[in-house]
Image (cartoon, grey):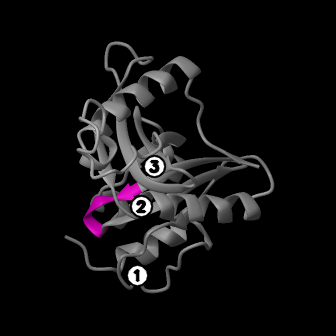
Amino acid sequence: MAKTDAIDASTRKALAGQTDTFLQALTRFNTKGMPPGAAGGLKAAPPPKLVDAFAYCAVSTTQVEKPPADLTSLLEAHGGWLHTIHEGKKATHFALTQEGHFDPLHHDVLSVTEGPLGQKIDDAIDWVEANFKEDAVVRILTFPSYYVHAFGILQDGKPFAVLIDPIKNLGKLEPNKKYPLKDFLAELAKQPHS
């Protein structure tokens, strides 16, 4: 069964509070304190909920073009996290958080972003859970120069990748398909990047 890295309950609760503060700035979530009728008769949206948490690993262009001998090093967690945020059953946002440098149990929310990535992650994790029957650790790989996210999966000490959000034609790379990380990087290296 695929699993993510663990975040303790108190940290998750603190992150939920910080995320709520970010989301309260968005008008559609912020009807607290408004006089009756000021929200056009609309009820406040149900409170958003942090659902999944993935260690977040950034991979540079150099690492794509000249991968390290030990590819599992690209999947090492360095304190960054990506969390999906749901409104009801749908992922509508995602949050990026970072462990504190002096206290790894303290996390700070760096950003909350509305967009399709949260739902694409949910869709891809459903595929991963159905196709990785043995124990596997799932992390998010981001390739900023290519504008691409993938799941980085460690299974039996071997690294794999599953493309999450193809925003353009990526050659032979397709979403919801298991690639050895070496093959994924080789194909991604052939693509134009910023």
Q: Name which residue lies at 76% across and 46% down.
A: 135
Q: Name which residue lies at 35% across and 61% down.
A: 115
In the rendered image, residue 103, in percent from the top left (x then y), is placed at 38, 13
What segment is highlighted magenta in the picture? Answer: 142-146
- Secondary structure of the residue carrying tag 2 is helix
Task: Answer yes or no: is residue 68 visible.
Answer: no
Task: Answer yes or no: is residue 128 visible.
Answer: yes
Label 1 environment density (alpha carbons within 10 Å; few <14, some 14–19, many ≥20)? some
* Mark 1–mark 2 distance (CA, rounded to whole Å): 17 Å
- Secondary structure of the residue carrying tag 3 is helix
Rendered-image quadrant of the C terminus: bottom left
The total number of labels drawn is 3
* Amino acid type for the residue under numbered disc 2: Leu
The residue at which mark 1 appears reads as: 170
Residues 106 and 15: in front is: 15
* Amino acid type for the residue under numbered disc 3: Leu
The residue at which mark 3 appears reads as: 74
Residues 86 and 61: in front is: 86
* Mark 3–mark 2 distance (CA, rounded to whole Å): 21 Å
Mark 2 or mark 3, which is nearer the start of the sequence? Answer: 3
The circle on residue 117 is 2
In the rendered image, residue 143, in percent from the top left (x then y), is placed at 35, 60
Q: Is residue 13 above or below residue 126?
A: above
- Secondary structure of the residue carrying tag 1 is loop
